Amino acid sequence: MFGRIMMALFIGAAICFFGVPVLFILALNGDVHFIGLIIAAMLSVWLLYIFSDIELYKKPKGKKIAAGIIGLCMVTGASFSIPHFYKQSFAEVDGEVDLQEYEPFTGSDKLAQSDSPSSFEIENDLPKLDGATALYPLYAAFTEAVYPRDSYPVYDPEFSNVISTTTPEAYDRLLAGETDIIFAAGPSSGHLKKAEHLGIELKMTPIGREAFVFFVNSKNPVNGLKSEEVKGIYSGKVTNWSEIGGKNDEIRAFQRPVDSGSQTTFLKFMENIPVQEPETEEMASGMGGIISEVASYRNYKNAIGYTFRFFAVDMVQNDKIKLLAIDGVEPTIETIRSDEYPLSSEFYAVTAGSYNPNIEAFIDWIISEEGQELVERTGFVPIE
């Protein structure tokens, strides 16, 4: 008996010796949904040995009892993973796209081009560019038109003069003097306060117009909402689609991270109406811990989210979502141009007092007829 106990303890220790590092790696990589399943598998192996060496297992129904206990253990462990895989089955609409497909001077057919060479070129003292994900195809087209032919890796701020780090980080880098021009929506209140604290004046030059859009699952029967209905959803006053012409289903309203371009535009749309707390999800931090972040949009049948039209229509190209008409107007190039769509807004080339000698001339070219042609050919609406 003593020998069997010692052997069981030895096998349990061996399982832990090999299993614990696996659990640590899973936690470090953020795959926490697998931990319950792995623990259940480790426990099942140990129980299998225990049951094989006791009298109960040797009785007629012993094997069934043992299988039932082990099965229950595995089902319990799997229950921690199933919700994750259920969530993963729904497309993440507002996730990142591969911007390498838009890099200048790579022969990309996704970049807009003019019919004739640019009348303005920069050979030296290249301004460092950064900006929003949705605007990278535009300023990459500017780059290809006026910068010298070279490599400009979009994800390499140490080497490249033309990158995209997303709106919040681009503003941070601009205020830190790490870049010369960023292309983005207007700054958040947080970035405005930071600029004021640093004694920096942000100069925003409008270079085009875009539509801020709300979208839902393509099977949602709701095709449009009034502005007040959208505000009701995000303030928590409207909680069920049946209240606004849809099915009897609770509304799942997704938001974007603080200081992102779409979140800043969203908060301006909401005006002074308090916004309900966003849906969050647990993520792994760089140190292997768990932090809570704003949940990425998952295309559940009852979900609603928001972004900019070009990003949704031209970059993500997801046919599982549909853009909502707002106040009876569809978000199209035509309604943005005519200003009929109520959530049309300008986007900017933003500077913060850089001494680069080519900034002013470059921005003048962007708002010239040549630059505005690229704005339109990319898929945005030029400024008047």
Image (cartoon, rainbow, N blue to C red):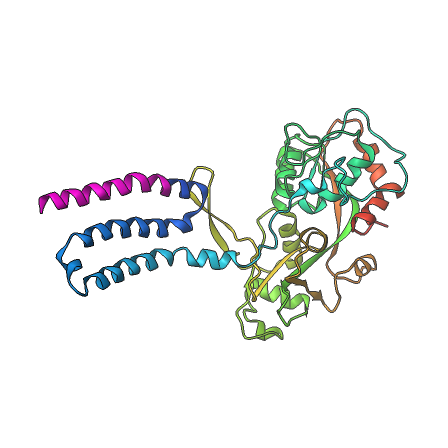
Residue 160 x/y as whole percent: 68, 30
Of residues 168 and 220, the one nearer the viewer is 220
Image coordinates for residue 172, horizontal then vertical, percent = 62, 37
**Left or right: residue 162 compared with residue 273:** right
Q: Nearer the viewer, residue 187 or 43?
A: 43
Please report the bounds of the magenta region as a residue range: 1-23
Image position of 145 with respect to 60: above or below = above
Q: Is residue 251 magenta?
A: no
Q: Is residue 253 left or right of residue 50?
A: right
How many numbered marks does the figure carry? 0
User: Which secondary structure dominates the residues rendered in magenta?
Assistant: helix
Q: Is residue 11 magenta?
A: yes
Residue at horizontal 63 percent and vertical 46 percent from the top: 189
Seen as rendered, the residue at the extreme left is 1
Horizontal and vertical percent position of residue 220:
62, 69
Residue 141 horizontal side relative to residue 283, left or right = right
User: Measured along the vertical axis of the image, is residue 279 above or below residue 249?
Assistant: above
Which of the 4 image quarters holds residue 221? Answer: bottom right
Viewer-proximal residue, 183 or 63? 63
Question: Can residue 280 be seen here?
Answer: yes
Residue 204 visible from this viewpoint: no
Nearer to us in this view, 96 or 62:
62
Q: Which residue is rendered at x = 22% and y = 50% of the image?
A: 49
Where residue 44 sits: x, y (%)?
Answer: 28, 52
